[in-house]
Image (cartoon, helix red, strand yellow):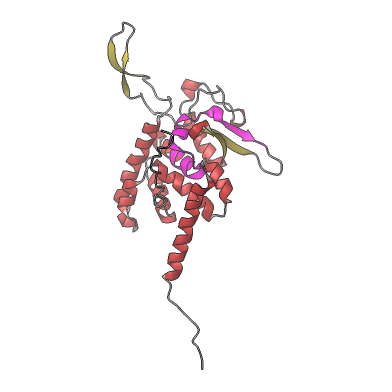
Amino acid sequence: MKGFKLPKTRLDVKRSFTEAEWAHVLHGVAALPIGAEQERLRCILELLVSSGIRLDELAKATRADLRLESLPGLADTWVLSVTGKRDKQRDVPLANDVVELLDAHATSFAGTDGAFADRDALPLIPGTQPLIRALGASVEQWMRDAEGQVTKAAVTGQGGAALSAAGIYAVVKRFMGRAAKTAPAAGLDAERFEKASTHWMRHTFVRQALVDGAPLEVVSELAGHASISTTSIYSSQELARKVQAIRGMKRRAVPVLG
Protein backbone atom coordinates (compact mmCIF):
# COMPACT_ATOMS: atom_id res chain seq x y z
CA MET A 1 0.00 0.00 0.00
CA LYS A 2 2.99 2.32 0.40
CA GLY A 3 3.29 2.66 -3.34
CA PHE A 4 -0.40 3.46 -3.81
CA LYS A 5 -1.17 7.17 -4.04
CA LEU A 6 -4.63 8.69 -3.98
CA PRO A 7 -5.34 11.50 -6.46
CA LYS A 8 -4.70 14.93 -5.05
CA THR A 9 -7.69 17.10 -4.20
CA ARG A 10 -7.88 20.07 -6.55
CA LEU A 11 -7.98 23.36 -4.64
CA ASP A 12 -10.58 25.66 -6.18
CA VAL A 13 -9.60 29.18 -5.13
CA LYS A 14 -12.62 30.57 -6.96
CA ARG A 15 -14.69 29.41 -3.99
CA SER A 16 -14.15 32.68 -2.17
CA PHE A 17 -16.07 35.93 -1.89
CA THR A 18 -15.23 39.10 -3.77
CA GLU A 19 -15.39 42.40 -1.91
CA ALA A 20 -18.84 43.08 -3.38
CA GLU A 21 -20.12 39.62 -2.46
CA TRP A 22 -18.86 39.87 1.11
CA ALA A 23 -20.50 43.30 1.44
CA HIS A 24 -23.76 41.65 0.35
CA VAL A 25 -23.28 38.97 3.02
CA LEU A 26 -22.76 41.58 5.74
CA HIS A 27 -25.76 43.58 4.52
CA GLY A 28 -27.88 40.43 4.71
CA VAL A 29 -26.75 39.73 8.28
CA ALA A 30 -27.53 43.31 9.33
CA ALA A 31 -31.03 42.98 7.85
CA LEU A 32 -31.87 40.01 10.09
CA PRO A 33 -33.91 40.60 13.27
CA ILE A 34 -31.66 41.57 16.16
CA GLY A 35 -31.39 38.71 18.61
CA ALA A 36 -29.47 35.58 19.59
CA GLU A 37 -29.71 34.00 16.12
CA GLN A 38 -28.26 37.03 14.33
CA GLU A 39 -25.61 37.39 17.03
CA ARG A 40 -24.46 33.79 16.61
CA LEU A 41 -24.41 34.06 12.82
CA ARG A 42 -22.19 37.15 13.04
CA CYS A 43 -19.83 35.24 15.33
CA ILE A 44 -19.55 32.36 12.89
CA LEU A 45 -19.10 34.41 9.72
CA GLU A 46 -16.75 37.06 11.05
CA LEU A 47 -14.62 34.60 13.00
CA LEU A 48 -14.19 32.31 10.00
CA VAL A 49 -13.42 35.06 7.50
CA SER A 50 -11.04 36.95 9.80
CA SER A 51 -9.03 33.97 11.05
CA GLY A 52 -9.12 31.32 8.33
CA ILE A 53 -9.75 28.47 10.78
CA ARG A 54 -11.48 25.34 9.56
CA LEU A 55 -15.08 24.38 10.33
CA ASP A 56 -14.06 21.47 12.55
CA GLU A 57 -11.57 23.67 14.40
CA LEU A 58 -14.29 26.21 15.15
CA ALA A 59 -16.73 23.55 16.37
CA LYS A 60 -14.16 22.24 18.86
CA ALA A 61 -12.92 25.65 20.08
CA THR A 62 -13.68 26.63 23.70
CA ARG A 63 -13.14 29.68 25.86
CA ALA A 64 -10.14 27.92 27.36
CA ASP A 65 -8.46 28.16 23.94
CA LEU A 66 -8.75 31.95 23.98
CA ARG A 67 -6.13 34.04 25.78
CA LEU A 68 -4.92 37.62 25.92
CA GLU A 69 -1.27 37.99 24.90
CA SER A 70 0.99 40.88 25.90
CA LEU A 71 3.82 41.15 23.40
CA PRO A 72 6.69 43.71 23.39
CA GLY A 73 5.89 46.73 21.26
CA LEU A 74 2.36 45.59 20.48
CA ALA A 75 -1.06 46.24 21.96
CA ASP A 76 -2.55 43.35 23.94
CA THR A 77 -3.94 40.84 21.45
CA TRP A 78 -6.45 38.02 21.74
CA VAL A 79 -5.11 34.69 20.47
CA LEU A 80 -7.05 31.51 19.75
CA SER A 81 -5.21 28.18 19.95
CA VAL A 82 -6.63 25.59 17.56
CA THR A 83 -5.78 21.99 16.79
CA GLY A 84 -5.85 21.30 13.06
CA LYS A 85 -5.08 18.41 10.77
CA ARG A 86 -2.55 15.86 11.95
CA ASP A 87 -3.15 17.22 15.50
CA LYS A 88 -0.98 20.21 14.65
CA GLN A 89 -1.57 23.15 16.99
CA ARG A 90 -1.29 26.77 15.96
CA ASP A 91 -2.10 30.21 17.39
CA VAL A 92 -4.42 32.54 15.48
CA PRO A 93 -4.71 36.23 16.50
CA LEU A 94 -8.27 37.59 16.68
CA ALA A 95 -9.47 41.16 16.28
CA ASN A 96 -10.95 42.77 19.39
CA ASP A 97 -14.36 43.27 17.78
CA VAL A 98 -14.57 39.56 16.93
CA VAL A 99 -13.88 38.67 20.59
CA GLU A 100 -16.55 41.18 21.63
CA LEU A 101 -19.02 39.33 19.39
CA LEU A 102 -18.06 36.05 21.06
CA ASP A 103 -18.53 37.66 24.47
CA ALA A 104 -22.02 38.86 23.51
CA HIS A 105 -22.91 35.36 22.28
CA ALA A 106 -21.60 33.82 25.52
CA THR A 107 -23.52 36.28 27.70
CA SER A 108 -26.78 34.74 26.47
CA PHE A 109 -25.88 31.63 28.46
CA ALA A 110 -24.70 33.32 31.64
CA GLY A 111 -27.56 31.66 33.51
CA THR A 112 -26.20 28.18 32.82
CA ASP A 113 -22.49 28.97 33.10
CA GLY A 114 -22.63 31.39 35.99
CA ALA A 115 -21.86 35.08 35.67
CA PHE A 116 -18.95 35.77 33.34
CA ALA A 117 -15.94 37.58 34.68
CA ASP A 118 -14.44 40.46 32.73
CA ARG A 119 -12.74 39.47 29.49
CA ASP A 120 -9.23 39.61 30.94
CA ALA A 121 -10.18 36.82 33.36
CA LEU A 122 -11.73 34.46 30.82
CA PRO A 123 -12.36 31.58 30.84
CA LEU A 124 -14.33 31.27 34.08
CA ILE A 125 -14.59 27.47 33.88
CA PRO A 126 -11.71 26.17 31.72
CA GLY A 127 -12.75 23.90 28.88
CA THR A 128 -16.50 24.01 29.51
CA GLN A 129 -17.57 27.00 27.43
CA PRO A 130 -17.74 26.39 23.65
CA LEU A 131 -17.23 29.41 21.41
CA ILE A 132 -20.28 28.63 19.25
CA ARG A 133 -23.37 27.25 20.96
CA ALA A 134 -26.72 25.70 20.17
CA LEU A 135 -29.53 28.13 20.95
CA GLY A 136 -31.99 25.43 21.98
CA ALA A 137 -32.30 21.74 22.69
CA SER A 138 -29.92 19.42 20.88
CA VAL A 139 -31.05 17.23 18.00
CA GLU A 140 -32.54 13.94 19.18
CA GLN A 141 -30.19 10.95 19.06
CA TRP A 142 -30.61 7.21 19.48
CA MET A 143 -29.32 5.97 22.86
CA ARG A 144 -29.97 3.44 25.61
CA ASP A 145 -31.86 4.48 28.72
CA ALA A 146 -31.13 3.36 32.31
CA GLU A 147 -32.98 0.06 31.67
CA GLY A 148 -30.96 -0.65 28.55
CA GLN A 149 -33.82 0.08 26.18
CA VAL A 150 -33.05 1.87 22.89
CA THR A 151 -34.73 5.25 22.84
CA LYS A 152 -34.52 8.53 20.98
CA ALA A 153 -34.00 11.71 22.96
CA ALA A 154 -32.14 15.01 23.00
CA VAL A 155 -28.81 15.02 24.82
CA THR A 156 -29.79 18.29 26.42
CA GLY A 157 -33.11 20.07 26.59
CA GLN A 158 -31.69 23.58 26.79
CA GLY A 159 -29.38 25.81 24.82
CA GLY A 160 -25.71 26.31 25.58
CA ALA A 161 -24.19 23.05 24.35
CA ALA A 162 -21.48 23.24 21.69
CA LEU A 163 -22.94 23.58 18.19
CA SER A 164 -21.52 20.73 16.11
CA ALA A 165 -19.65 21.20 12.84
CA ALA A 166 -22.74 19.96 11.01
CA GLY A 167 -24.84 22.48 12.93
CA ILE A 168 -22.54 25.39 12.07
CA TYR A 169 -22.49 24.30 8.43
CA ALA A 170 -26.30 24.17 8.34
CA VAL A 171 -26.60 27.66 9.88
CA VAL A 172 -24.32 29.11 7.19
CA LYS A 173 -26.01 27.26 4.32
CA ARG A 174 -29.47 28.46 5.40
CA PHE A 175 -28.26 32.03 5.48
CA MET A 176 -26.49 31.77 2.11
CA GLY A 177 -29.73 30.48 0.64
CA ARG A 178 -31.44 33.69 1.78
CA ALA A 179 -28.56 35.79 0.47
CA ALA A 180 -28.91 34.11 -2.94
CA LYS A 181 -32.50 35.32 -3.26
CA THR A 182 -31.48 38.99 -2.94
CA ALA A 183 -28.22 38.69 -4.91
CA PRO A 184 -29.65 39.50 -8.39
CA ALA A 185 -31.05 42.82 -7.12
CA ALA A 186 -27.52 43.70 -6.03
CA GLY A 187 -26.09 42.74 -9.42
CA LEU A 188 -24.51 39.54 -8.08
CA ASP A 189 -24.62 35.90 -9.14
CA ALA A 190 -27.18 34.08 -7.01
CA GLU A 191 -25.71 30.67 -7.91
CA ARG A 192 -22.44 31.49 -6.17
CA PHE A 193 -24.26 32.17 -2.90
CA GLU A 194 -26.23 28.93 -3.32
CA LYS A 195 -22.93 27.06 -3.58
CA ALA A 196 -21.19 29.00 -0.79
CA SER A 197 -20.33 27.17 2.41
CA THR A 198 -18.20 27.63 5.52
CA HIS A 199 -15.05 26.78 3.53
CA TRP A 200 -15.61 29.82 1.32
CA MET A 201 -14.79 32.01 4.33
CA ARG A 202 -11.48 30.21 4.77
CA HIS A 203 -10.59 30.74 1.10
CA THR A 204 -11.66 34.38 1.40
CA PHE A 205 -9.41 34.93 4.42
CA VAL A 206 -6.32 33.57 2.66
CA ARG A 207 -6.95 35.44 -0.58
CA GLN A 208 -7.69 38.76 1.12
CA ALA A 209 -4.69 38.42 3.47
CA LEU A 210 -2.40 38.04 0.45
CA VAL A 211 -4.08 40.91 -1.39
CA ASP A 212 -3.57 43.11 1.67
CA GLY A 213 0.14 42.33 1.63
CA ALA A 214 0.50 39.73 4.40
CA PRO A 215 3.66 37.61 3.90
CA LEU A 216 3.03 34.29 2.20
CA GLU A 217 4.67 32.23 4.94
CA VAL A 218 2.64 33.98 7.68
CA VAL A 219 -0.65 33.37 5.87
CA SER A 220 0.36 29.73 5.37
CA GLU A 221 0.97 29.32 9.11
CA LEU A 222 -2.28 31.05 10.08
CA ALA A 223 -4.30 28.85 7.73
CA GLY A 224 -2.55 25.71 8.94
CA HIS A 225 -1.55 24.63 5.44
CA ALA A 226 0.71 21.59 5.26
CA SER A 227 2.89 23.32 2.69
CA ILE A 228 3.51 26.91 1.65
CA SER A 229 2.92 25.76 -1.93
CA THR A 230 -0.77 25.36 -1.04
CA THR A 231 -0.98 29.00 -0.01
CA SER A 232 0.91 30.13 -3.10
CA ILE A 233 -1.98 28.85 -5.25
CA TYR A 234 -4.04 31.79 -3.97
CA SER A 235 -1.23 34.19 -4.86
CA SER A 236 -1.04 32.73 -8.38
CA GLN A 237 -4.77 33.20 -8.75
CA GLU A 238 -4.43 36.89 -7.90
CA LEU A 239 -1.65 37.25 -10.48
CA ALA A 240 -3.87 35.59 -13.09
CA ARG A 241 -6.63 38.09 -12.38
CA LYS A 242 -4.17 40.96 -12.81
CA VAL A 243 -2.91 39.55 -16.11
CA GLN A 244 -6.46 39.18 -17.40
CA ALA A 245 -7.26 42.75 -16.38
CA ILE A 246 -4.21 44.17 -18.18
CA ARG A 247 -4.90 42.16 -21.33
CA GLY A 248 -8.46 43.40 -21.33
CA MET A 249 -7.38 47.05 -21.36
CA LYS A 250 -7.41 49.08 -24.57
CA ARG A 251 -3.91 49.64 -25.94
CA ARG A 252 -2.88 53.27 -25.99
CA ALA A 253 0.51 52.95 -27.64
CA VAL A 254 2.62 55.94 -28.59
CA PRO A 255 2.52 56.31 -32.39
CA VAL A 256 5.74 55.62 -34.24
CA LEU A 257 6.91 58.72 -36.12
CA GLY A 258 8.99 58.70 -39.28
Percent position (x, y) of residue 105? 47, 33
**Residue drawn at (37%, 36%) of the image:** 169
| Label total for image | 0
Front one among 127 and 87: 87
Judged left or right of residue 100, residue 245 is left
Judged left or right of residue 156, residue 230 is right
Tell me the chief SS of the magenta region. helix
Front one among 157 and 208: 208
Q: Is residue 73 above or below residue 210?
A: above
Q: Which residue ends up furthest to the right in the rendered image?
A: 72
Span shown in magenta: 43-70
Percent position (x, y) of residue 129? 50, 25
**Residue drawn at (36%, 19%) of the image:** 155
Percent position (x, y) of residue 226? 51, 41
Residue 56 belongs to the span the image colors magenta: yes
Residue 175 picture quarter = top left
**Residue drawn at (41%, 56%) of the image:** 20
Residue 33 belongs to the span the image colors magenta: no
Residue 241 picture quarter = bottom left
Percent position (x, y) of residue 10? 39, 47
Q: Is residue 198 above or below residue 210?
A: above
Question: In which quadrant will I find the N terminus?
Answer: top left
Q: Which residue ends up furthest to the bottom in the rendered image?
A: 258
Q: Is residue 192 above or below residue 161?
A: below
